[in-house]
Amino acid sequence: MAYIKFFFGFTLTVSCAALIGCQTITQFDDPTNTYTPESTYQKLIGEYPFIHIASRAVPAPIQEFKNITYIRYGKRALQLDLYRPASTVSQQLPGIILVHGGGWRAGFRTNFTPMAIGLAQRGYVAATISYRLAPEAKYPAAIQDVKAAIRWLRKNAKKYGVNPGQIVVGGGSAGGQIASLAGVTHGLEKFDPPIQNPDISSAVQAIVNIDGLSDFTSAAARFHEDDPRKTPSAAGAWFGGRYSEKKELWHEASPLFYVNENTPPILFLISAQERFSLGHKEMIEKMKPFGIYSQVTHIPASPHSFWLFDPWLQPSVDIVANFLDRQFKIMHSDNVR
């Protein structure tokens, strides 16, 4: 085996055969990363015996483009999967970058494949992305990766039939917080260093936050995210320290504190588990004086990670698509489903 250490401080173990055959590393090997729909299903089935894991099967009207590298850090390549209606690419459609959850330290982009397919069926170009998780690179690496993905989508808009003026960022759980922070921090170099494509904007025209935090600093959020029984907690692992040790980072990573006149419209799609979406009410109050549109939709009697499962996937897709249709003034014919 060989060990490779990158400039941002993580170490990968790869076989010599892999080094000889391919110099690109597309996956960080972390055996603790077990956050999948299958593992979550086992935790939820007792309380929700009617649920089913949402299908990742790609229907015929949808085109799938797999394993596209959107940015490289040395030999490390971050990839995305893209889904779009099987229509001519001369038709420019809104695009959305989808960021999976997993407590900032776990998860896979395929967790969002069913939603991406559903949004493609509603006339959107949807890309699910992999990004650097906490065991590989701490905050704010994930935000930088998401902005790189936005730049990539805008740069390749013509190739994939995307309207470069209608790009959205969304995500679920930790991915919702990451997406929201990426969406409200346009122009701040800490979150968007000019590594690649600096001449292409990473601004978005809307944000979709599905059950993700808007404020790490509230007492309620700290109670859950800085649990002293966990060493470290999920947030603590991402920030590299507890709230008492890294107050400035816990504040800095809270989308709530970036609201201004340029903040994009936001959809908050929320489960019955209120702790995961803490801070959204305060964020909306800050948006109101600027006249920025927001929408809050609750999924009743739902668990966290509801978007991974039927019967909640299709209603979630419809809520997101209807919100975006409103923002982009899109009228669909009956056969676009």
Image (cartoon, rainbow, N blue to C red):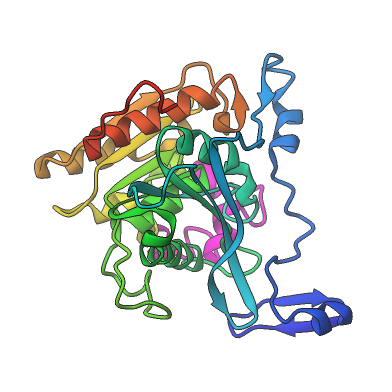
Residue 283 point in image, percent of width and height: 27, 42
* Foreground of the two, 288 or 113: 113
Q: Which residue lies furthest to the top in this view?
A: 50
Q: Position of residue 173 (x, y in %)?
A: 51, 42
Expressed as whole percent of the image width and height from the top left, the position of residue 190 reads: 36, 73
Residue 241 quadrant: bottom right
Q: In which quarter of the image is the N terminus?
A: bottom right
Query: Does residue 297 appear left or right of residue 63 in this picture?
Result: left
Residue in the foreground of this view, choosing between 202 and 279: 202
Residue depicted at x 66% and y 50%: 230
Q: Position of residue 212 (x, y in %)?
A: 45, 42
Q: In this view, does 89 lie above or below 121?
A: below
Is 243 contained in the magenta span? yes
Q: Is residue 8 above or below residue 143?
A: below
Asked if residue 30 shows in the view, the reply is yes
User: For this rendering, which residue is in front, 109 or 284?
Assistant: 109
Residue 42: name its quadrant: top right
Report the residue at 24% width, 38% height from top: 327
Q: In this view, does 326 lie to the left or right of 24?
A: left
> What span is in magenta?
223-250
Residue 224 lies within the magenta run = yes
Residue 216 visible in the displayed image = no
Residue 318 placement: quadrant: top left
Image point (67%, 19%), residue name: 51
Closer to the camera in the image, 49 or 117: 117
Image quadrant containing the C terminus: top left
Instruction: Look at 58% across and 36% down and name the residue there.
Output: 114
**Picture layout, residue 11 above or below residue 293:** below
